[in-house]
Image (spheres, grey):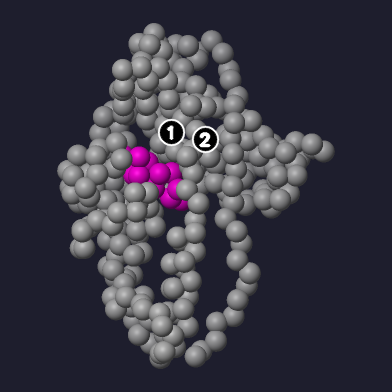
């Protein structure tokens, strides 16, 4: 080809599904090591999957939660202190090898040069993607957008009947190109999530209240982080002090309400690439 670029001879399944769970450390796992999500679906154990991927349990859980919430359909089914891969995830992962073989066939076709350049371009763009400290990242659809002169309120569908409202400026809504039916990412820091016990929430109706159940707790001497499984299958991380947990008697299996202020939800959209025409080379 004379281009100076080197393209892998074989596109493996991790090249296709790997973008779901980026490795923030930048350290690549040993060659041939199955992807964390595949390993979790295979073993059914978070501890064993984390060990196989060279991660601790908290790192592995964080990445699985991110993949679950950025997928159009839930990939995890979380119950009290137990999680498993959903049937959708199993079917998706089961197709990865056949997808890889099919894609390799495209690369090997007479017009493969064009597709090889597309693959290289994708690799560069993936490396340029920004990472975000907000550990709650949801891929959602805008159900309704109400815009005034200064502010706008977007009603976001998280799936499974769960929805929240995000308040942003009207200028931001215009810049992001938000409209009813469009898709976006909702970013929520765990510290912005207020956790209420079922008894505490019974006497008050709060905006952006999501019902769920605690499925995992991570505790330090002072602070705690709880994972709440929402009715629609999404997983929400919330930070609170251990004293607050004890006062509200929140533990694994507890029914809770997660309250999020509409002004503390950050919205983001992916850049829409310009239309391009592929020509045979």
SS majority, magenta: helix
Q: Which residue is mark 2?
A: 188
- Few, some or many C-alpha atoms within 10 Å of disc 1 (few <14, some 14-19, many ≥20)? many
Determine the residue positioned at 53% across, 40% down.
187
Name the side, left or right, on which 3 lies relative to 165: left
**63 or 132: which is nearer to us?**
132
Residue 251 appears in which quarter of the rendering?
top left
Mark with earlier residue (1, 2): 2
Q: Residue at x 47, y 11 (%)?
A: 200
Pointers 1 and 2 in contact (C-beta within 8 Å): yes
Residue drawn at 57 percent across, 55 percent down: 270
Q: Is 65 colored magenta in this rendering?
A: yes
Give the SS element for disc 2: strand
Give the residues in magenta.
61-72
Question: What residue is rendered at 47% in x and 48% in y?
Answer: 131
Depth-wise, is mark 1 or mark 2 nearer the camera?
Answer: 2
For the N terminus, give its image quadrant: bottom left
Location of mark 1 (residue): 236
């Amino acid at each position: 080809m004379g281009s100076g670029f080197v393209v892998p001879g074989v596109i493996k399944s991790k090249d296709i599904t790997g973008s779901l769970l980026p490795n923030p450390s930048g350290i690549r796992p040993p060659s041939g090591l199955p992807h964390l999500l595949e390993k979790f679906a295979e073993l059914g154990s978070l501890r064993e999957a984390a060990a196989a991927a060279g991660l601790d349990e908290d790192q592995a859980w964080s990445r699985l939660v991110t993949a679950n919430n950025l997928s159009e359909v839930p990939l995890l089914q979380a119950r009290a202190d137990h999680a498993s891969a959903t049937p959708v995830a199993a079917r998706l992962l089961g197709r990865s090898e056949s997808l890889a073989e099919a894609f390799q066939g495209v690369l090997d076709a007479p017009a493969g040069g064009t597709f090889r350049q597309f693959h290289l371009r994708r690799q560069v763009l993936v490396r340029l993607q920004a990472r975000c400290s907000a550990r709650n990242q949801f891929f959602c659809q805008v159900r309704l957008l109400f815009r005034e002169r200064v502010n706008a309120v977007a009603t976001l569908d998280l799936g499974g009947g769960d929805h929240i409202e995000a308040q942003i400026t009207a200028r931001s809504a215009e810049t992001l190109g938000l409209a009813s039916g469009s898709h976006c990412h909702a970013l929520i820091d765990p510290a912005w999530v207020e956790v209420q016990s079922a008894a505490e929430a019974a006497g008050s109706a709060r905006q952006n209240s999501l019902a769920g159940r605690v499925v995992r707790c991570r505790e330090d001497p002072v602070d705690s982080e709880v994972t709440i499984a929402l009715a629609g299958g999404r997983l929400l991380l919330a930070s609170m002090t251990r004293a607050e947990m004890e006062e509200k008697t929140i533990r694994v299996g507890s029914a809770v309400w997660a309250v999020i202020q509409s002004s503390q939800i950050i919205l983001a959209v992916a850049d829409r690439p310009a239309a391009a025409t592929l020509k045979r080379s």
